[in-house]
């Protein structure tokens, strides 16, 4: 049963207190707006607050900067979780017709003995967030009157990092962990045991710069620390999804920021993503109608975009206000150029070991936003392709923090290239060799391609591996490729004609390729750089096919029959 806000009488002090209290317990928006006096909240925040009213919360909230996401998600929600739901509250709510399910939910949402960890990128900011909570307990007359049962005494633990309000000693409690624990990214977490975590703006400028121009190590450290915060959950607080209530608040910072890591590796999290300009979701379906028009009109957003523009690019505006890593019109490679295939068995009625049941590549086409088999293109026997195994080593100076190993297949009749295998990772050289030799054996290859630098770096390991395993020994062919940063960009951008001509086919599972394809030039380049190496390895095949075609034409011309005109 959905809560209906109670009218607040002005001539009855106890009635006023009861109405405000029940409305607060049932509505996070009412609590933030009326009790915490956040008067600038609007329809956007009513919707956001309704998304946070869950007893099984695992949410990444991506909202534009300066849209009060921390007000709703960190300040208001952390206090709301710790509000008491007493027997009297239960009786009053039950008398209004709310059933057992509603009352049980209230007990799960509100725990006077709650313990919440609130984190932020910087220690100064996390202390400031704590002082906002201080102010409500010390000076907010409405809060102190309506929820007087949580106002602490003077001898209660209350400092910049740990704040414990008055607890219900008739219920289970952990006195070693305060009601609110505040920590900055990287700070020690030992000794606290919480039932809720709110990570607010864990990423900052240093991590962004390092991600876009350096080796990405700061973002890696932030992600690792974020994962470590989950070790602070009290096991008794785990929810139906298997992990305690957790909210991650922040806007986007780039292609490989914290939010993207969570999206890729933590499927228990939902994402609530909003674009300041609208057109982002069912709640805000039209682009050009801003989601928070009370304060961010399109005119103001346009001015902010101009302010943030740097070197002719609006990257920061796109990330901070639109929660995107690149705009479709800025992308070099268009979504409609993508071509995909899936694998199929030639004879699925036969065992995989039967040579008649060979691997087929089944081509797909996009229809109504769904990829389906293309009836116009026949399946292709993967065995007829010319295979190339290419290895590109990491180079943090050139936005390539991972090694890339790929297998490409070339079909000369159509001049089509297929990405058949893709391995991306921070492998040690021993692990990297295992990947290379495994893929070579799977494809029956006796060689792989690498740049001169990679060949030199791997030479000792390859020679040693070949000496120990002569049966599967591999040769290394050197890629004649300039690996300077400018040459890398030219190599990648030269792929545009290949993609635009719809000559490149990729399996849908190669998410690293599609992520780079869609984000370039604003994203990573490790896979695209490796793909850019493929054409140079195929020139020999193309020249051979061309010379055979010319020879065939010459022979046909020499053996022609003479006609009346001498032809």
Image: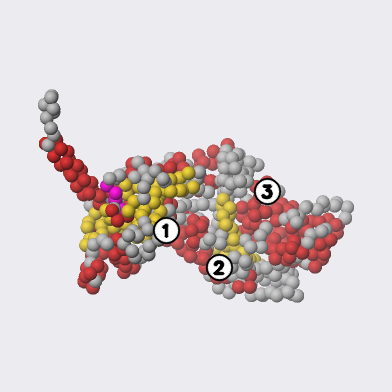
| Residue 154: image location, x then y, percent | 73, 70
**At numbered mark 1, what does the secondary structure look like: helix, strand or loop?**
loop
| Cα distance between the residues tagged 2 and 3 | 31 Å
Instruction: Give the image quarter of residue 74.
Output: bottom right
Q: Where 259 falls versus 158 (above or below)?
A: above
Q: Residues within 10 Å of mark 3 (few under 14, many from 20)?
A: some
Residue 41, disc: 3
Residue 141 relative to residue 223: left or right:
right
Q: Residue at x 32, y 57 (%)?
A: 407
Provide the residue designation for mark 1.
Answer: 216
Which span of residues is magenta-colored? 408-412
Marks counted in the figure total 3
Quarter of the image that includes the N terminus: bottom right
| Residue 53: image location, x then y, percent | 67, 58
Instruction: Give the image quarter of residue 125.
Output: bottom right
Closer to us: 525 or 563? 563
Residue 374 visible in image: yes
Instruction: Give the image quarter of residue 156.
Output: bottom right
Residue 97 relative to residue 204: left or right:
right
Q: Residues within 10 Å of mark 2 (few under 14, many from 20)?
A: some
Q: Where 304 falls versus 386 (above or below)?
A: above
Q: Earlier in the sequence, mark 3 or mark 1?
A: 3
426 within the magenta span: no
Q: Residue at x 19, y 47 (%)?
A: 544
Provide the residue designation for mark 2.
Answer: 230
Quarter of the image that includes the C terminus: top left
Q: Residues within 10 Å of mark 1 (few under 14, many from 20)?
A: many
Residue 311 relative to residue 460: left or right:
right
Q: Earlier in the sequence, mark 2 or mark 3?
A: 3
| Residue 126: image location, x then y, percent | 59, 61
1 or 2: mark nearer the eye: 2
């Amino acid at each position: 049963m959905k809560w209906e806000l109670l009218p607040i009488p002005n001539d009855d002090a106890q009635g006023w207190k009861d109405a405000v209290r029940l409305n607060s317990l049932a509505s996070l928006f009412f609590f933030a707006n009326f009790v915490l006096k956040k008067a600038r909240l609007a329809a956007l925040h009513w919707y956001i607050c309704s998304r946070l009213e869950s007893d099984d919360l695992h949410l990444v909230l991506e909202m534009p900067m300066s849209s009060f996401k921390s007000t709703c998600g960190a300040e208001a929600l952390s206090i709301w979780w710790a509000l008491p739901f007493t027997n009297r509250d239960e009786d009053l709510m039950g008398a209004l017709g709310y059933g057992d399910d509603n009352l049980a939910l209230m007990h799960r949402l509100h725990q006077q003995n709650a313990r919440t960890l609130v984190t932020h990128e910087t220690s100064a900011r996390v202390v400031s967030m704590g002082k906002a909570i201080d102010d409500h307990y010390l000076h907010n007359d409405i809060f102190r009157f309506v929820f007087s049962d949580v106002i602490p005494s003077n001898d209660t633990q209350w400092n910049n990092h740990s704040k414990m309000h008055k607890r219900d000693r008739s219920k289970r409690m952990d006195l070693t962990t305060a009601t609110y624990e505040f920590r900055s990214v990287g700070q020690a977490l030992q000794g606290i045991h919480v039932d809720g975590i709110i990570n607010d703006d864990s990423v900052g400028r240093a991590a962004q710069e390092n991600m876009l121009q350096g080796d990405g190590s700061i973002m890696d450290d932030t992600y690792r620390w974020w994962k470590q915060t989950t070790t602070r959950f009290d096991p008794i607080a785990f929810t139906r999804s298997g992990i305690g209530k957790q909210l991650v608040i922040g806007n986007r910072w780039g292609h490989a920021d914290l939010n993207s890591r969570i999206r890729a590796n933590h499927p228990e999290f939902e994402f609530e993503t909003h674009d300041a300009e609208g057109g982002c979701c069912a709640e805000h379906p039209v682009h050009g109608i801003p989601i928070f028009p009370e304060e961010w009109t399109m005119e103001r957003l346009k001015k902010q975009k101009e302010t943030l523009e740097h070197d002719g690019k609006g990257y920061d505006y796109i990330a901070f206000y639109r929660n995107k890593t690149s705009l479709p019109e800025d992308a070099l490679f268009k979504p409609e150029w993508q071509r995909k295939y899936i694998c199929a068995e030639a004879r699925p009625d036969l065992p995989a070991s039967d040579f008649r049941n060979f691997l087929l590549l089944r081509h797909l086409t996009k229809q109504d936003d769904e990829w389906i088999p293309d009836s116009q293109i026949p399946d292709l026997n993967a065995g007829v392709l010319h295979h190339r195994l290419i290895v590109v080593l990491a180079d943090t100076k050139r936005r390539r923090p991972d090694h890339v190993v790929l297998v490409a297949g070339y079909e000369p009749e159509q001049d089509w290239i297929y990405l058949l295998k893709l391995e991306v990772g921070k492998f040690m050289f021993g692990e990297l060799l295992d990947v290379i030799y495994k893929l070579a054996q799977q494809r029956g290859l006796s060689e792989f391609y690498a740049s001169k630098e990679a060949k030199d770096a791997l030479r000792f390991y390859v020679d040693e591996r070949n000496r120990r395993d002569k049966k599967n020994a591999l040769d290394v062919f050197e890629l004649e490729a300039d690996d300077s940063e400018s040459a890398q960009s030219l190599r990648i951008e030269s792929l545009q004609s290949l993609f635009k001509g719809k000559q490149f086919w990729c399996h849908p599972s190669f998410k690293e390729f599609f992520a780079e394809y869609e984000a370039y030039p604003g994203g990573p380049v490790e896979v695209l750089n490796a793909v850019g190496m493929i054409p140079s390895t195929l020139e020999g095949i193309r020249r051979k096919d061309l010379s055979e075609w010319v020879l065939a034409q010459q022979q046909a011309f020499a053996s022609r029959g003479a006609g009346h005109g001498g032809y």
